[in-house]
Image (cartoon, rainbow, N blue to C red):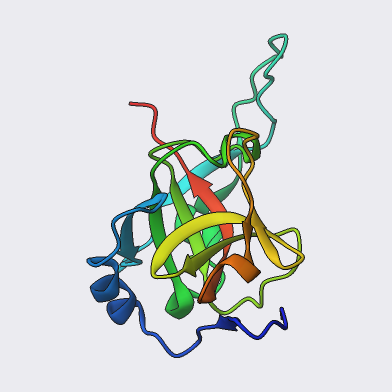
Amino acid sequence: MIHCTNVQKENTMSPIDLIRSYARKINTNVDEVYVRVSNKSADIPLFNNKVSAGFPSPAADHVEVRLSADQYLVKNPTATYFVRVKGDSMINAGILNGDVLVVDRSIDPSIGQIILAEVDGEFTVKYLGQNQLTPANPNYKSISFDDADTVALIGVVTGVMRKYI
């Protein structure tokens, strides 16, 4: 937990309240906020052999286990929601414009983690630093807690989803 006079972790806001408050946000690197909805999980085959990103390797035909994306990405379903990224301030962390981040509000943020924060009423995704939020792109400046009226550490980013097609 970060201890600063103008920093607070907001635990009481429900995802619905968060979404309602999001309508007021305009200058942010979070494009959309989604409540996690999953009535049924789709189990997809997870193959035993890893896929080579270099030279091809012989293919394996058997499935090791079945994997649900929901089970893989979400530890605490009631405290997890998704946000769509807008912008390129986190590209060196592998987070690209249009990606959907998995955010868990039940995890206490620690220095060095990627977090969703609200700074002076605006959402942002950054690394949590000592008394600052740090982008993963040298074209952007860190946000000092001392320069903000309010900083709320909303949740920890636990995963990223990306579609290619």
Residue at (44, 90) in percent of width and height: 12
Pinpoint residue 47: horizontal percent, then vertical percent: 60, 36
In this view of the protein, which residue sits in the foreground, 125 or 69? 125
Give the left or right position of residue 130, taking residue 100 as reference. Answer: right
**Above or below, comparing residue 18 to residue 25 in the picture:** below
Total numbered labels: 0
Residue at (59, 66) in percent of width and height: 147
**Above or below, comparing residue 2 to residue 135 in the picture:** below
The picture quadrant where one finds residue 40 is bottom left
The picture quadrant where one finds residue 110 is bottom right
Q: Residue furthest front?
A: 147
**Above or below, comparing residue 51 to residue 100 in the picture:** above
Pinpoint residue 137: horizontal percent, then vertical percent: 62, 36
Pinpoint residue 75: horizontal percent, then vertical percent: 56, 70
Residue at (33, 61) in percent of width and height: 33
The picture quadrant where one finds residue 107 is bottom right
For the C terminus, give its image quadrant: top left
Residue at (48, 67) in percent of width and height: 119
For the N terminus, give its image quadrant: bottom right
Give the left or right position of residue 108, taking residue 154 as reference. Answer: right
In this view of the protein, which residue sits in the foreground, 148 or 47? 148
